[in-house]
Amino acid sequence: MITNLGIGTGRRKCAVARVFLREGTGKITVNGKEVDQYFKQGAHVYAVRQPFIVTAAENKYDVLIDVSGGGPNGQAGACRHGVARALAQVDPASHTALRTNGFLTRDPRMVERKKYGQRGARRRFQFSKR
């Protein structure tokens, strides 16, 4: 039986990530794939690993992440938020380091909804005087 040391839920834009922290060697699995295979861009992989780099816990835990919704950027941000929450749950001493780097703060920026009578959220239809 594998026990989860910490569980964290991360959110960013429309993406939601459930993160399970287990004892291990630093293996990160996202939706059944290695983190390098799931996220094609290096910046997204780095974003997921950032909380471990800040807390110097890179090879202490195995991470299992289930992420859904949104695009790759939102999913990477959700994974980072969830990993930070799980790390703060496991090691309360790392909470201040994670907080100062902004990993525990949920990024509130969302796509603005489209309004009726307009072409987009803010874009208007072209005005014609005649």
Image: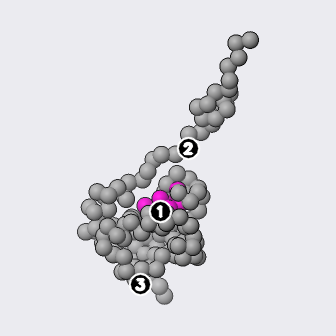
Quarter of the image for the C terminus: give it.
top right
Q: Earlier in the sequence, mark 1 or mark 2?
A: 1
How is colour applied across the structure in the image?
one colour
**Residue at horizontal 32 percent and vertical 67 percent from the top:** 54
The reply to whether residue 79 is visible in this rendering is no
| Left/right of residue 55 with respect to residue 122 in the rendered view | left
Check disc 3 and report the residue beneath it. Answer: 24
Tags 1 and 2 touching, CB below 8 Å? no
Q: Residue at x 32, y 62 (%)?
A: 98
- Amino acid type at circle 1 is Ala
* Disc 1 from disc 3: Cα separation: 24 Å
Residue 16 belongs to magenta span: no
Q: Is residue 130 above or below residue 79?
A: above
Give the SS element for disc 1: helix
Q: Main secondary structure of the magenta part?
A: helix
Q: Secondary structure at mark 2?
A: loop
Q: Which residue is mark 1?
A: 43
Marks 2/3: CA–CA distance = 37 Å
